[in-house]
Image (cartoon, rainbow, N blue to C red):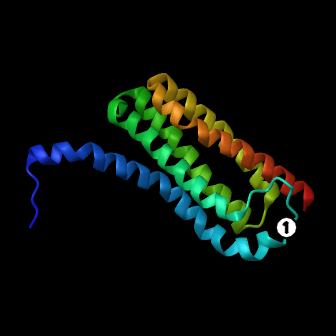
Amino acid sequence: MFILSRKGLRRWMPALAAGLSVFFAACAGIIGSMFTTEAIPTWYATLNKPWFNPPNWLFGPAWTTLYILMGLAAFLIWKKYRQTKKGKQALVVYLIQLVLNAAWSIIFFGFYSPGAALIEIILLWVFILWTIIIFWRLRRTAGILLLPYIMWVSFAAILNFFIWRLN
């Protein structure tokens, strides 16, 4: 039987907290994938897509990487600022954008609504930007970790727009 001492537990707590933060971020993706998985070979396959639409296999690795970066960014804020008013506000904005992240997949793939998803992804983009600004002010590294996320969502918004227009 493996028992950690208090000292050993304290040594592992940051890694455990970081892992939980990444898992929590990935939950948005897990929720979204429940709506995405079935729609991709059926409804999504029938849509007209722009020439720059990436292959379907690219989305999984891209989002996995982004959820890891998002979780690590949130962990950096939580670790140092969770007891402060600014830290709590930053984490609330982060949680809102996570909910919006999951909601996009539900709207686009679950409700088959590229138009409504386009409106939602614009709101998501605003909240990601707000999260980056708040995180950046508290800990620059946390803000930097979210830059690939806003770039990918910017691309996704453009893709969403063209899919809406073509269909």
Task: Determine the residue positioned at 53% across, 38% down.
Answer: 93
Residue 74 location in percent, x, y? 44, 40
Residue beneath disc 1: 47
Residue 145 location in percent, x, y? 51, 36
Task: Determine the residue positioned at 53% across, 31% down.
Answer: 144
Residue 26 appears left or right of 7: right
Residue 51 location in percent, x, y? 86, 55
Mark 1: give few (<14), some (14-19) or many (20+) Cα within 10 Å: few
Task: Determine the residue positioned at 55% across, 63% down.
Answer: 31
**Kind of element beneath mark 1:** loop
Residue 10 appears left or right of 96: left
Task: Determine the residue positioned at 67% across, 37% down.
Answer: 126
Residue 25 appears left or right of 118: left
Amino acid carrying label 1: it is Leu
Q: Can you say whether 37 is above or below 78 in the image? A: below
- Picture quarter with the C terminus: bottom right
Residue 36 appears left or right of 51: left
Residue 90 location in percent, x, y? 48, 33
